[in-house]
Amino acid sequence: MAMKVSLPKVSIYPRKPWQPYYHRRRNDKKQQQQRARESKSPLLAQHQKAYNESNSETQTLAPPKAQSLLGHTDPDDRLPYRFYNPLGDGEFNQEQIVKAYLDGTTTTELQLDIPCRAEAVFKVKAVTRCSASISGHGESILATAFSPATSSRLATGGGDKTARIWDCETGTPMHTLKGHTGWVLAVAWSPDNGMLATGSMDNTVRLWDPAKGEALGGPLKGHTKWITSLSWEPYHLREPGRPRFASASRDYTIRIWDAVSQHTDMALTGHKGCVSCVKWGGSGQIYSASHDRSVKVWDASKGTLLQTLNAHAHWVNHLALSTDFVLRTGYHDYKGKREVPETVDGKRRKAKERYDVATAGAGGIERLVTASDDCTMYLWEPSRSPKPLQRMVGHQKQVNHVTFSGDGVLIASAGFDNHIKLWQARDGKFLNTLRGHVGPVYQCAFSPDSRLLVSASKDTTLKAWDVKTGTLAENLPGHQDEVFAVDWAPDGERVGSGGQDKAVRIWRN
């Protein structure tokens, strides 16, 4: 008869002489029971042996990096997945699946194969320090844009009538682009990184070679008032050897330019107020927002008006597309130059593949979000309906800037009420308010992996936010005055900012 011993949970006394013997007897008894079961069922023994071997191999062979992807470390480091609707188009929606069962569209006998794909296979670290403060501009910096190919090149436009290209590796000026006779209000890189376009208060657009810092021809004349916005034709739609771009102006028009011949292809007229923003979509449509309270959708090949989106009660300040990130970067991705195709056809094919992946979650269509002085935003699917998908309310003052995350899942809006708000891009549902700024927020930009957001404010600071938790990741003081413009490099390495203190600041981890 075995001796029954009750072990204390906590003991400050030395181990009793009989304790090792008791544990040994208990383990021996378990092994005897296991051998008895295996002798009765040889098949069970084989399965158990195979399982133990595979389990030991997994534990010994998985490198630390694989273990982190498998979720063996901090939950924030786990590889996120995005799930899609197994019964149709769009993202996974539990309500739709339950409804399909209730209305008899499908049955419990049906096996659901849920499509999914890995999201953001690389992780961007929050910028924590100012790696360079570069002086050069003689007046306020009004626009910033990183090259689509690398974070080592940043272009800025300023009130000193020049645009400048900076080397962010060394923190030094590379080229000063002189020629404009008014403030430079907009800068835009072509998706192939071959040209830089600048728009100015002198009513002209100029094209530059960013590698040499030289002007490509003279000024592009046609507009009769300031240039407010520029947008390049997506790379996968471009005719070989004929890059084009669109410019918006305070003269109520949008012009489409051939960058090689430097002539106007088409002038799109119809707005009754200043055109504040223009975007060239990946499906061959151009979207324009205006102070006449409307958004217009144009056919880029014919120059005809497709539809007018009316909903706002005041000026429309800004608009953003769910595909902005992939259209801006073309065939460049996080893998860098080593993955760039060699041929033009290969580059176009890769750009098209990236665009198709970006629109897969929305059923292959682009979504559009608009921000207005009426303190609201509207979410649209123009290819499906001229009516808005959702009215997004919450800001207490004018909404100045709006942007989609790189994966097209989130929307961030910056307002003059000192707040940034996060919204769900699928249905415009409100998610979170990011509070911390003590002045109007002028611009915001997502990190390429969509996990972080950086904002620029009148309160002289930048702030980096954790999108998932809605909390402040890093406070970035350093500017001496208002910060007007900010951009996060497509490779995630750096953030560039500029404002009224005339200095460009480069931030990194």
Image (spheres, rainbow, N blue to C red):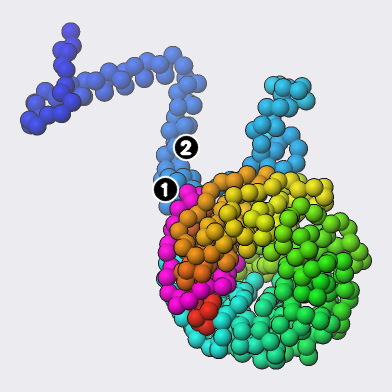
Name which residue lies at 43% across and 33% down: 52
Name which residue lies at 53% across and 67% down: 456
Q: Nearer the viewer, residue 315 or 124?
A: 315
Judged from the image, the secondary structure of the residue bearing numbered disc 1 is loop
In the figure, residue 227 lies in which quadrant? bottom right
Expressed as whole percent of the image width and height from the top left, the position of residue 390 reads 70, 46
360 over 483 or under it: above or below: above
Q: Nearer the viewer, residue 34 or 101?
A: 101
Give the residue at mark 1.
Answer: 74
Q: Residues within 10 Å of mark 2 (few under 14, many from 20)?
A: few
Q: Is 483 colored magenta in this rendering?
A: yes
Looking at the rendered structure, which numbered label has been put on residue 54?
A: 2
Q: Quadrant of the N terminus?
A: top left
Q: Which residues are magenta?
A: 468-492
In the figure, residue 115 lies in which quadrant? top right
Q: Earlier in the sequence, mark 1 or mark 2?
A: 2
Q: Nearer the viewer, residue 333 or 24?
A: 333
Name which residue lies at 50% across and 21% down: 43
Q: Please indicate, yes or no, whether residue 126 appears anywhere in the rendered image.
A: no
Expressed as whole percent of the image width and height from the top left, the position of residue 430 reads 59, 46
Q: Is 66 colored magenta in this rendering?
A: no
128 over 450 or under it: above or below: below
Q: Quadrant of the C terminus?
A: bottom left
In the figure, is residue 194 to the left or right of 415? Answer: right
Expressed as whole percent of the image width and height from the top left, the position of residue 136 reads 53, 88
Q: Disc 1 residue type?
A: Asp
In the figure, residue 105 lies in which quadrant? top right
